[in-house]
């Protein structure tokens, strides 16, 4: 089969104005970035305020493995398939981060015949949103350090500055740094560090803001440090919420591009689901809901991370009620969850054992009282016996299931999935049944325990001494009435990346709590999770090049 890049380069894209016309976006709302991508002005919301909102379809998955799950591919393919059967559809995705693109993934724009385009632009600089977020984050850092240098009127304790710099690369060497070294003119010497851009609170805020005014308000609420009296110091106290908003004035606008089948795609925002909330922007999703009858969107990683945060953080904040959930699984990945080392050969025993992981993710979605469809994302190595075993298991357990072949066959390979999703919505629309998992006003420990027990299947939660001290401070500072954003390995239902399948008899260890007051949630770090990843021994970046006017090595 052809590579993803070969497929992309053979496809003839439509000029972005044609894509905009297909969803009735006039030129007055379009800000073109070349021929094939554009931003849509937020002014369009006023023109669309009377238009009925479309139905939201959330795509999630089992816990990821190196065998691959194809969640983005399924998301794109489903949107194409819906259009193929005559439904007005649009796909709403996150922007890829340079970190995984240059590190392990090589790209994140779908795959095969279910891709968004221009894929090389989307995976690299796109429209500059990531750069704007990085600059906005680091502008706050520069102003904090300048404040210290210029007399420190706010009485900031340099040892209690919690705001870190960021960079959209995997760079472990920057996890801990010292700034202000050298002569006094270089500033106040202190310890600092870098997060990857997608873990920045600025990214979370951009994706959770509902307007430019709400963006500015949230930025002002960011806690950057504590003074010598242990009182919070915010961006608003520093007086720099205005300039940060200015830096983000274009980044807040959703990006319009297209799939291989010319289905409109809004790609905007990119928080990781293992260390942030893992969903595209509220603004992009709400705009998509006004522009099409069916909006297909995804949440990062499995239903234990991305879907949980989509349903417990994004939906309540945005007033979004999903109509249906698609749970993606591959036979290859399920065999790995069942203990198989070689996922390319038939292994019915491992497959049957690994189905426990899929079963848990199905149960997780059921806890939100949402209807769902299981999508078996087919690989060439899947045998007829393996497909029959998984399909029969699903049917026997009353799970609606579809064999998806969008990677190899494009829209036609997703027709059955699209029809079953539409039928599910028409007979049991989750819009009328959806409920979030916990009450925001509950105690922090109770909310954490609810997620750990109900979603992960843990027996309970343990806290480090540091986390317990932070917990006490959060109650004192009034941070207890917000949702919880769990930072956990995506590879396991536990906080140990090496434990696969559906484990039991385990506990979750909370090692640190961080407040993201601007975003409006409390980040809970578990296990060995890090907010600045590192590159692998042989990063994908070493395979990338630009030859004869074309990108090489992406995917």
Image: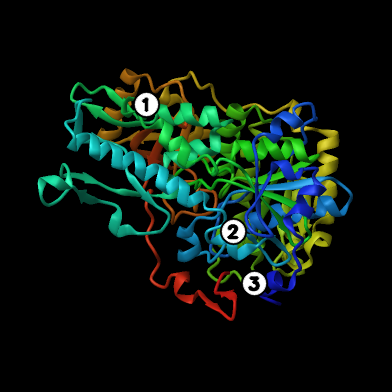
Task: Report the mark closest to the observer, 1 or 2.
Answer: 1
User: Which label number is shown at residue 317?
Assistant: none
User: In this rendering, is residue 354 above or below 281?
Assistant: below
**Could you say which quadrant of the image residue 53 lies in?**
top right
For the C terminus, give its image quadrant.
bottom right
Tell me if mark 2 has few (under 14), some (14-19) or many (20+) residues whose alpha carbon lies within 10 angstroms of its own: many
Q: How many marks?
A: 3
Instruction: Identify the residue under disc 3.
Output: 5
Spot occupied by residue 226 in the image (x, y as percentages of width and height)? 25, 28
User: Which label number is shown at residue 122?
Assistant: 2
Alpha carbons under labels 3 and 2: distance apart: 13 Å
Does any portion of residue 278 appear in the rendered image?
Answer: yes
SS for callout 3: helix
Task: Report the mark closest to the observer, 3 or 2.
Answer: 2
Q: Which residue is rendered at x = 71% and y = 40% of the image? A: 288
Task: Report the mark closest to the observer, 3 or 1.
Answer: 1
Instruction: Identify the residue under disc 1.
Output: 236
Spot occupied by residue 78 in the image (x, y as percentages of width and height)? 76, 52
Looking at the image, the residue that sits furthest to the right is 86
Alpha carbons under labels 1 and 2: distance apart: 33 Å
Spot occupied by residue 19 in the image (x, y as percentages of width and height)? 77, 52
Give the mark, 3 or 1, whose residue is nearer the N terminus. Answer: 3
Q: Are marks 1 and 2 in contact (CB under 8 Å)?
A: no
Tell me if mark 3 has few (under 14), some (14-19) or many (20+) residues whose alpha carbon lies within 10 angstroms of its own: many
Tell me if mark 1 has few (under 14), some (14-19) or many (20+) residues whose alpha carbon lies within 10 angstroms of its own: some
């Amino acid at each position: 089969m052809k590579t993803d890049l070969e497929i992309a380069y053979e496809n003839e894209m439509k000029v972005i104005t044609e894509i905009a016309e297909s969803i009735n976006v006039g030129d007055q709302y379009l800000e073109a970035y070349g021929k094939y991508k554009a931003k849509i002005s937020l002014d369009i919301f006023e023109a669309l305020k009377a238009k009925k909102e479309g139905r939201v379809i959330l795509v999630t998955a089992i816990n990821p493995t190196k065998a691959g799950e194809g969640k983005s591919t399924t998301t794109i393919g489903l949107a194409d398939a819906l259009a193929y059967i005559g439904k007005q559809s649009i796909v709403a995705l996150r922007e890829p981060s340079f970190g995984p693109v240059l590190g392990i993934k090589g790209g994140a724009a779908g795959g095969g015949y279910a891709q968004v385009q221009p894929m090389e632009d989307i995976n690299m600089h796109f429209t500059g949103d990531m750069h704007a977020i990085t600059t906005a984050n680091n502008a706050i850092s520069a102003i904090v350090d300048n404040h210290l240098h210029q007399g420190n009127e706010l009485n900031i304790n340099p040892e209690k500055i919690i705001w870190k710099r960021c960079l959209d690369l995997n760079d472990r060497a920057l996890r801990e740094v010292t700034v202000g070294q050298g002569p006094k003119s270089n500033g106040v010497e202190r310890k600092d560090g870098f997060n990857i851009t997608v873990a920045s609170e600025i990214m979370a805020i951009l994706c959770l803001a509902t307007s430019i005014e709400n963006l500015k308000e949230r930025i002002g609420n960011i806690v950057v440090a504590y003074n010598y009296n242990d009182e919070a110091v915010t961006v608003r106290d520093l007086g720099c919420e205005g300039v940060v908003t200015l830096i983000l004035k274009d980044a807040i606008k959703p990006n319009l591009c297209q799939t291989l089948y010319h289905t409109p795609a809004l790609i905007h925002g990119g928080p990781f689901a293992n260390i942030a909330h893992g969903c595209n922007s509220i603004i992009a999703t709400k705009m998509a809901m006004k522009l099409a009858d069916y909006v297909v969107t995804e949440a990062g990683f499995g239903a234990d991370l991305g879907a949980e945060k989509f349903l417990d953080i994004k939906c309540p904040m945005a007033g979004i009620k999903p109509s249906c959930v698609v749970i993606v699984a591959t036979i290859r990945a399920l065999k790995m969850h069942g203990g198989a080392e070689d996922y390319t050969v038939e292994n019915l025993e491992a497959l049957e054992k690994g189905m426990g992981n899929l079963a848990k993710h199905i149960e997780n979605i059921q806890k939100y009282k949402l209807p769902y469809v299981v999508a078996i994302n087919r690989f060439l190595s899947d045998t007829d016996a393996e497909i029959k075993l998984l399909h029969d298991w699903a049917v026997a357990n009353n799970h609606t299931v579809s064999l998806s072949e969008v990677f190899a066959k494009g829209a036609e390979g997703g027709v059955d999935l699209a029809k079953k999703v539409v039928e599910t919505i028409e007979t049991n629309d989750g819009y009328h049944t959806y409920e979030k998992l916990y009450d925001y006003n509950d105690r922090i420990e109770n909310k954490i325990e609810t997620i750990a027990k109900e979603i992960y299947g843990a027996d309970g939660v343990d806290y480090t001494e540091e986390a317990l001290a932070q917990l006490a401070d959060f109650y004192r500072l009034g941070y207890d009435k917000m949702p919880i954003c769990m930072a956990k390995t995506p590879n396991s239902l536990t906080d140990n990346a090496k434990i696969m399948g559906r484990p039991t008899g385990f506990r979750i260890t909370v090692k640190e709590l961080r407040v993201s007051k601007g975003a409006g949630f409390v980040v809970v770090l578990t296990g060995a999770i890090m907010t600045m990843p590192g590159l692998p021994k042989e990063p994908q970046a070493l395979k990338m090049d630009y030859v004869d006017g074309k990108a090489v090595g992406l995917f």
